[in-house]
Structures are given as structure tokens and as C-alpha cells.
Amino acid sequence: MNMKKIGFIGLGIMGKPMSMNLIKAGYQLIVSDFNKEAAKELEQLGAEVESTPKAIAEKSDIVITMLPNSPQVKEVALGENGLIDGAREGLIYIDMSSIAPAASQEVYRALVEKGVDMLDAPVSGGEPKAIDGTISVMVGGKKEVFEQSKEVLAAMAGSVVHVGEIGAGNVTKLANQVIVALNIAAVSEAFVLAQKAGVNPEAVFEAIRGGLAGSTVLEAKAPMMLDRNFKPGFRVNLHIKDLTNALETSHEFGAPTPLTAAVLEMMYALKVDGHELDDHSGLLKYYEKLANVEVTR
């Protein structure tokens, strides 16, 4: 049994398998009871359950959060009965949510007053990689705090990279989400063109995957599109959140992102059409509607 006690708040699509991997690695876990069903499952695996972030912080050496967006992170960290109320010198807080970099910096400034060190460590890879422990983690914060926490992060991940100071993790994640979204849009656009022109999109996929157009996104999402399987690994509404954060951040720093803005609007159109809970490969449906065609194998 690893002696480090880890608090884990946010047992959703990603958080639950990530916390299970920590238990498998021998860490003692204290989880939040916000998601009752998931908490019960973790409890059966040996985790302790607490009802407030304050109580979790008081009992933990490291607290990890995996939450939907900036407001939830701020609430858990700085709100009533939040981590800040249970904080003490030496506690490490690792936020693995994908949020606005400015929000990470704001939380950090408040917690550092209490002697708490913080890392922003968003992840990429979606649910399948969270389950098999091969997510990629991009980490912002002090190098020495990163080194202290690397072993814990590695228990959930295939790759853990320090990218800079606090907030840098989330800037890196936004860059990742821009590339992924634009790539999915490009694949969708190309497949709809092929279908409409009478060429089998599956044949197109097989022909191009080994060339320059080949990518991890193409390999992961093309089979889903061809199977019309839009069960979420990563939902449209979460990608809308990430691209909104990317646009806000780009405006803050004066780095125009016109393609990101265009794809964000496509995703909003999908949301209006009732597809916000689909996998982001459902961007295909936006193009299908424009061209009045359905992509098939």
C-alpha cells in the first residue's frame, strides 16, 4: 500500500476510471460522495468517502479534481467548505479538469496563501485511455512540485509532461482541443465530399490513412463515423466548452483563432439540433445536413 493519501473529487466519465487506476497502483483514496453511485463503487474497492472538499483536504497529502469547467473548480477549491478551508502547509492540489488558464492562476493565487502548491494537469485521450491508464497529461506549475507528483500522475497515464508554469497545462490542452476539433471537421468534410461524389468513404479512409493525412484523430474517429457510432468518448458539449475557453484565451492574448471560431459555431449548430451529448465525431452530422447525404460504409 502506498502511504500517500489522495483525495479525488469528480467521479465522472474520466474521473472514475482514473481514480480506480490509483487504487490499483496501491494508493489510499478518499473520494467525494457527490456522485453517489460512483462513490459506492469506489468504496467497494477500498476508498474512503467524504462529503465536502474541506474534509477531503484535511485528510489528504494530494487532492485531485476532475470537474466539468472553471466555475466547478473554483467552487470546490475556494467555495464554502472548499479545499481552501481544509488546506494546510504542504498539501498539493492537482486540478486535472480542462478549464480556462486564467481560472487555474486565480485558484493558485488563493491557495498559495495557505501554503498549498498547485498543478494544472489537464488530460487528453478520452474515456478508453482513462480506463486503460494511458491518458496524456500536460502539467503546469513549479518543476519541483511536478517532480513530487509525477509518480501519482503516472499511475493514471501513459505520458506525463511538464509544460511550464501554472496555467501552461490548460494552454496546452486548449491547443490540443483546437487541433482535435479542426481535424474532426476536416475528416467530416472530406467524407461527406467523397460520399456525395459517389466514392466509398471507407475506401477513402483505407487509401489515405498511411499518408500525410493520416492522424490519431483519423484512426480514432473515422471508424466511428463509418459505423455511425456516436456514443461519447468525448461529448460535443464538452468540446464546445473547451473551444469557448480557447477563444476567450486567444482574445486575451491577441492570437486570433478563426478556424476554431468556425468549428465552435458548427458544434453549436449540432447542439441546437439536439446532438450535444453525442461524441464529437458527430460533427459529421453537421456536414451531412449541409450536403443532404448520409455517410455509410
Image (spheres, rainbow, N blue to C red):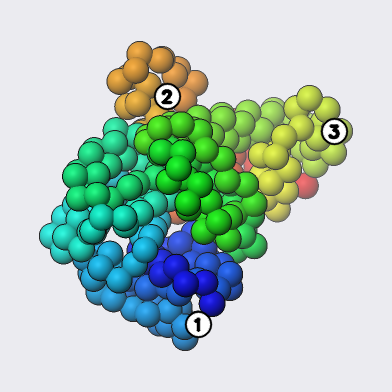
Please give left or right for residue 108 compared with residue 16 in the image: left
Q: Nearer the viewer, residue 245 or 270?
A: 245
- Residue drawn 29% across the image and 36% down it: 105
According to the image, label 1 marks what residue?
45
SS of the residue under disc 2: helix
Q: Residue lying at the far bottom in this picture: please name it.
A: 44
Q: Which residue appears at 35% of the width and 26% of the height? A: 249
The residue sitting at 35% across, 54% down in the picture is 92
Could you tell me how many numbered marks the image carries?
A: 3
Gap in angstroms between the C-alphas marked 3 and 2: 30 Å
Return the x and y of residue 211 as percentages of the image width and height. Answer: 83, 28
Any part of residue 283 in sight: no
**Residue position marked by numbered label 3 in the rendering:** 210
Residue 182 placement (x, y as % from top left): 56, 29
Give the residue type that dot 2 points to: Ala
Give the amino acid at mark 3: Gly
Judged from the image, the secondary structure of the residue bearing numbered disc 3 is loop
Distance between the alpha carbons at the discs numbered 1 and 2: 43 Å
Q: Position of residue 261 (x, y in %)?
A: 42, 24
Instruction: Please say if the residues under marks 1 and 3 sit with CB atoms less than 8 Å apart.
Output: no
- In the picture, residue 252 is in which quadrant? top left
Which of disc 3 and disc 1 is earlier in sequence?
1
- First in sequence, mark 1 or 2: give its number: 1
Residue 261's label in the rendered image is 2
